[in-house]
Amino acid sequence: MRQSILGLYQKYHRGKENAITREAFKLEYAMQIPDFTDRIFRKIYSELPICTCEKGGFWPVRKIEILEYREYLKKKAIPLFERWQRVNKAHVELMNGNGQMELFL
């Protein structure tokens, strides 16, 4: 199934100008892929070597698309990290001896 989904991106959604949202992809291709469910698709989608942008996912065909994807991810990652830092600083009492918050209690 992974190869089928990847193949569809490589064939029909090459380049940023051909990006497609996950929802549109599901509507367009669900009938072509056996045992296609939203849960399986989300798992596979998260692991595909595709780029994403405001318009959806696509198979990159130019170096600039990959560089723009990196910047797109930075815009999302930095605010998330800053949010984690705020929580971390606000809850110093929960820190253990090695400076990491305990994830598993």
Image: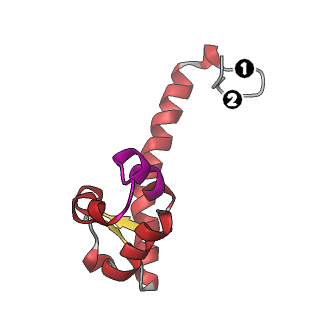
Magenta-span inclusion, residue 60: no
Q: Is residue 95 visible?
A: yes
Amino acid type assigned to the residue bearing label 2 in the image: Gln
Task: Say the numbered circle drawn on residue 100.
Answer: 2
Q: Quadrant of residue 55?
A: bottom left
How would you rate the neighbour count of disc 1 (Cα within 10 Å): few for under 14, some for 14-19, many for 20 or more?
A: few
**Residue segment shown in magenta:** 33-44
Residue 42 in the image: above or below residue 6:
above
- Residue furthest bottom as drawn: 62
Which residue does the image show at 40% across and 79% down from the upper left? Answer: 10
Q: Are marks 2 and 1 in contact (CB under 8 Å)?
A: yes
> In this rendering, would 80 be left or right of 16?
right
Residue occupying the point 50% across, 42% down: 81
- Observer-nearest of 38 and 21: 38
For label 1, the SS is loop
Q: For the point 46% across and 84% down, which residue is it?
A: 63
Which quadrant is the C terminus positioned in? top right
Residue furthest toward the top?
A: 93
Residue at the front extreme, as displayed:
34
Q: Is residue 38 magenta?
A: yes
**Height in image: 17 above or below 51?**
below
Residue type highlighted by circle 1: Asn
* Spot occupied by residue 99 in the image (x, y as percentages of width and height): 71, 28
The quadrant where residue 95 appears: top right
Q: Which residue is mark 1?
A: 96
Label 2 element class: loop
In this view, the residue in front, 9 or 51, is: 9
Q: Can see residue 54?
A: no
Alpha carbon distance from label 2 to label 1: 6 Å
Vertical side of 81 occupied by 100: above or below: above
* Residue 57 rendering spot, x and y as whole percentages: 34, 66
